[in-house]
Each structure stands twice: as C-alpha cells, then as structure tokens.
Image (cartoon, helix red, strand yellow):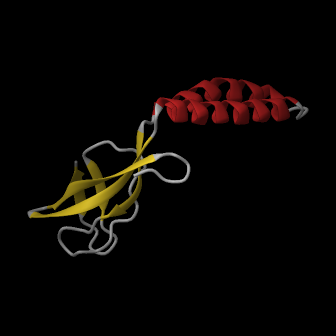
Amino acid sequence: MKNAINKEIITKEVQVICQDACQSGELDICVYSRGQRVKRALKKAVICLVILTLSACVPVAHFILVPTVLVLAPILIYRSWAVEREIISARIKCAKCQGELTSLTTKERYPIFESCRACQRENRISG
C-alpha cells in the first residue's frame, strides 16, 4: 500500500514472547526507496548547513558550536540515509497481561525488547 507521500507501507506479523507466553501482533513498517532516503539526507544536510551558518554568527559560542556541528553533521546525514525501513505503528500487546506495548523504537531491528507498562515484564518481539 502507498500513502499520499508515496511511501510504501507494509504490515508485518510478529511474535511477542514474554516468559513462557507467546502471541502474535502486527507492525506497520514504512519502506523508503533510495530516492526518498537521499531526499531525507539532503534535508538533514540543509538543516545542518543553516545551523552551521547561524552558529558562526554567535560571538563567543561559535568556537564550540561550529566544530560540533561540523563533526555531527556527517553522522546525522549518514544515519538518516541509512534507515531503509522504520516502524510507524504497532498493534501488539504484552503476552502475559495483554497490556499495550506502545514505546516501540522506530528502527526495525529484531529482536526488539519492550517492557510492559502494566506488569513491568520484558517482552521480546521477533519478526
């Protein structure tokens, strides 16, 4: 399925395991094409360039701000380009108490470990 911004969104079934209990859930994953990843990286590059320009104008702080932005900019740009798939929503529950697991990270790297807010048990989510 494609949404209005032309991103491909897929639904993936996952297994949620908590101690000896197991159940299934679903994750909605956004898949970025190479062109979309390049656009995101360019957007970050422009933002870093604007921050760099503005921080060069700050009288004393520019001695720290400019080198910091120069070091962090390539890292931020690469990290935004490297993300090919990210989790945008989840329909999963704790395998033990059926409490909602809502604080999922956006990166799709399995296994994902999330703590249930209701029972404080750790759940393992595997794709």
In the image, what residue occupies the spot 85% across and 29% down?
A: 56
57 with respect to 11 (left or right): right
Locate residue 67, reporting x and y percent: 72, 24
Residue 73 location (% of width, % of height):
64, 28
Residue 50 occupies quadrant: top right
Looking at the image, residue 27 lies above or below residue 35: below
Give the residue drawn at x 29%, y 49%. Answer: 112
Among the 4 quarters of the image, the one containing residue 17: bottom left
Residue that lies at the very extreme toward the left in this rendered image? 20
Number of numbered discs visible in the structure rendering: 0
Nearest to the observer: residue 2 or residue 62: 2
Give 9 or 68, whichever is nearer the viewer.
9
**Residue sitting nearer the eye, 74 or 27:** 27
Across and down, in percent, residue 60 comes to 87, 32
Residue 113 at what x, y percent from top left? 28, 53
Q: Is residue 112 left or right of residue 102?
A: left
**Is 60 placed left or right of 50 in the picture?**
right
Question: Which residue is depicted at the point 8% across and 63% down?
Answer: 20
Q: Is residue 123 left or right of residue 86?
A: left
The correct choice, above or below, for 69 with respect to 7 in the image is above
